[in-house]
């Protein structure tokens, strides 16, 4: 296991959970980090990010989490049972987040080492709107496009298997079109996923997309966004 990986993940998660940032409340949001070729850390379902510690994370087998995506259709209960069975230490308390398969995709196909998934209010003010996709179709601010590239927009699907399937499809299409994985994923009616090689990349992309969302919301008072790219 890379030195200090869990400590870095804990620190990143606490930053994400900081109430003043308004990225998540209570047990919302989840984070993960790739340990090696076969396993990763994922936040346990319901654990509060702001008070994250070593007990907030479960080590899960990557292959088992990815298997959920391609397998037969499963209810949320069945997905939860499969994820619980994917724990490396079956005696570890708690069950992995329902969004574990989406994290597994970001840590494999998405090439990330750290992933932060949040529900920031300004981002969701747009993602929950009718014109969400059009709002993020171009870049008006420019800086976020430079740092985060073009975001991957994933249409609404319930969490668990349906969402993971759409994220899988989206990541493949994005890779084919752009020759590299996205740095940020926008989940319609849901939230943001930031993919990074380091915790700092995840935190910076998240902050930048929140700032971009605030700018986009502000442009509504002045005729809407003027896209520069
Ligand atoms: Zn979520």
Image (tube, rainbow, N blue to C red):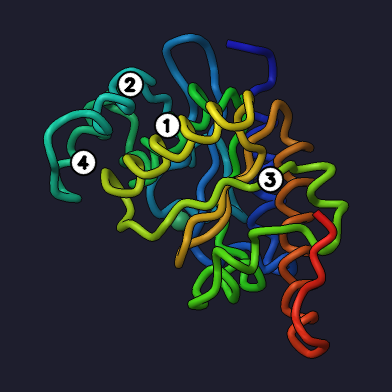
Q: Identify the mark nearer the N-term, 2 or 1.
A: 1
Q: Quadrant of the C terminus?
A: bottom right
Residue 66, quarter of the rendered image: top left
Q: Is residue 9 left or right of residue 30?
A: right
Query: In front here: 93 or 150?
Result: 150
How far apart are the alpha carbons under marks 1 and 3?
31 Å
Number of residues whose C-alpha sits closer than 10 Å to that of mark 3, classed few (under 14), some (14–19) or many (20 or more) = many
Read off the residue under disc 3.
150
How far apart are the alpha carbons under marks 4 and 2?
18 Å
Which element is circle 4 on? Answer: helix
Residue at image coords 77%, 73% = 225
Residue 89 is tagged as: 2
Query: In front here: 131 or 160?
Result: 131
Report if the CB atoms under discs 1 and 3 are less than 8 Å apart: no
Number of residues whose C-alpha sits closer than 10 Å to that of mark 1, classed few (under 14), some (14–19) or many (20 or more) = many
Residue 58 is tagged as: 1
Which element is circle 2 on? Answer: loop
Report if the CB atoms under discs 3 and 4 are less than 8 Å apart: no
Report if the CB atoms under discs 2 and 3 are less than 8 Å apart: no
Which element is circle 3 on? Answer: loop
Q: Identify the mark nearer the N-term, 2 or 3.
A: 2
Which element is circle 1 on? Answer: strand
Read off the residue under disc 4.
79
How far apart are the alpha carbons under marks 3 and 4?
31 Å
Of badges 2 and 3, the one in the foreground is 3
Question: Vertically, is 38 above or below 183?
Answer: above
Number of residues whose C-alpha sits closer than 10 Å to that of mark 2, classed few (under 14), some (14–19) or many (20 or more) = few
């Amino acid at each position: 296991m890379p030195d200090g990986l869990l400590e870095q993940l804990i620190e990143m998660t606490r930053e994400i959970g900081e109430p003043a940032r308004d990225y998540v409340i209570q047990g919302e949001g989840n984070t993960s980090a790739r340990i090696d070729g076969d396993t990763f850390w994922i936040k346990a379902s319901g654990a509060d990010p702001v008070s994250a510690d070593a007990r907030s994370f479960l080590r899960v087998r990557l292959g088992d989490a990815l298997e959920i995506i391609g397998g037969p259709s499963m209810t949320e209960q069945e997905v939860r049972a499969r994820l619980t069975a994917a724990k490396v230490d079956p005696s570890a308390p708690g069950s992995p987040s329902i969004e574990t398969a989406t994290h597994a995709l970001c840590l494999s196909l998405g090439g990330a080492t750290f992933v932060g998934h949040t529900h920031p209010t300004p981002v969701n003010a747009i993602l929950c709107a009718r014109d969400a996709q059009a709002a993020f179709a171009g870049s008006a601010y420019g800086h976020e496009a430079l740092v985060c590239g073009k975001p991957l927009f994933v249409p609404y699907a319930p969490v668990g298997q349906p969402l993971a399937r759409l994220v899988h499809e989206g990541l493949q299409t994005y890779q084919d079109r752009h020759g590299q994985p996205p740095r940020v994923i926008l989940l319609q009616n849901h939230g943001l996923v930031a993919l990074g090689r380091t915790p700092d990349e995840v935190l910076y992309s998240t902050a930048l997309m929140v700032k971009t969302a605030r700018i986009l919301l502000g442009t509504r008072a002045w005729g809407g966004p003027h896209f520069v790219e």
